[in-house]
Image: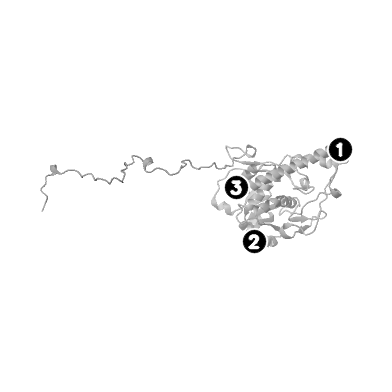
Amino acid sequence: MADDTPMSNMQGPTAVQLPANIQQNSIPQGPGELYTPAHDYHTSVPISRQKTLVPPLTLGAYSDDNLILEPPKEHSFEIGEFVPPGFFDRAHHTWFSHHASTADWTYAQRREAQQILPFLYLGPASMARDRDFVRSEGITLLLSIRDKRSAIARLLSGAKVAEELGIQADAIDVDSEQELISLYPSIIRGINQHISSGVSARPDLPPRVLVFCESGNGRSASVVIAYIMSMMNLDMVSAMWAVHHRRFCIDVDESMQTLLQSYQAILDAKREVAKARRQEVTTSSSLGIQPSSRPGGQLAKKRSFIEYDCDNNTPIHSGHNGFSSQKTVIQANDDAEHLKQKPAPFIERAA
């Protein structure tokens, strides 16, 4: 039966009486009134300042983002610290000059190797197994930076390819980044020993070194950065940007950056020691006093991963971790005239 109540007699809904113990809340008028925050929230993203590598003006221009590396004007370290005797006579200054324009980076390039300097390449382990690449680029030394567990499993080694192509290969085996930083000087000496040995794939090319790890982005990248810092007289940020410019995918995390900053402090200390020693020798010479020298008049040097007989340039392949089992000392002039001057830089031979 239909309801005969007229529409005009209908009333609105009756208000519900709430119990006394329940408080009625008003409906929020905007998004900010939906709830009361229990904690303080930050609306800015990111919360902490992120580190950004800005290209130094000495390496290029901000506008075009080009990379310009020039030969160092001086080598502040003593002979034997990073370079063997006669290094600046055998290595050409153009090997330390590199100009590179900005190119579009693609994801596939992380699987390739990039040229950082005319004689120095950085890439993943897969490129060390690429015989066509090694042959075409004139690589003469495959240098692996690997974990000791990989060494036990005989992984990340370029020995097989090197044997097939008649070139050299070696590996630096470490347990941690802290151990790696202690090996930077010997690795750098080994690279410089190799490129000054005269062993090149073609007469028109210098000896070339491919530094690699599993990805080519971690420990091997830190080795190349350390090399640039030591040989090009660049600070950590400038050296990192130079390598990052050529290989965009390198992954130098906060812990590795801290270690590289520590290495920069070590380099600064070595420069100060060399400077003080030169000043001491200069003062002694002016007073007619025989300068103090190291025992036996020799410059002690830890063995690098590739050693050469100074008499006949015959390569002597090293033992575990790239260090020769034979105790050898490289002779170096320790007379007053030698110590008064810095090692001759490339720029003096550019003319």
Give, as a three-letter code, the residue at label 1. Answer: Ser
Q: Pointer 3 and pointer 2: residues touching (CB < 8 Å)?
A: no
Q: Nearer the viewer, residue 331 or 137?
A: 331
Mark 3 = which residue?
254
Question: Mark 2 falls on what kind of element?
Answer: helix
Which x, y percent locates residue 13? 20, 45
Which x, y percent locates residue 265? 69, 43
Left or right of 252 in this view: 195: right
Give, as a three-letter code, the residue at label 2. Answer: Arg
Mark 1 = which residue?
285
The answer to which of marks 3 and 2 sits earlier in the sequence is: 2
Mark 2 = which residue?
149
User: Distance between the Cα atoms at labels 3 and 1?
Assistant: 47 Å
Question: Mark 3 falls on what kind of element?
Answer: helix
> Which residue: 88% across, 39% down?
289
For residue 216, the mark is none
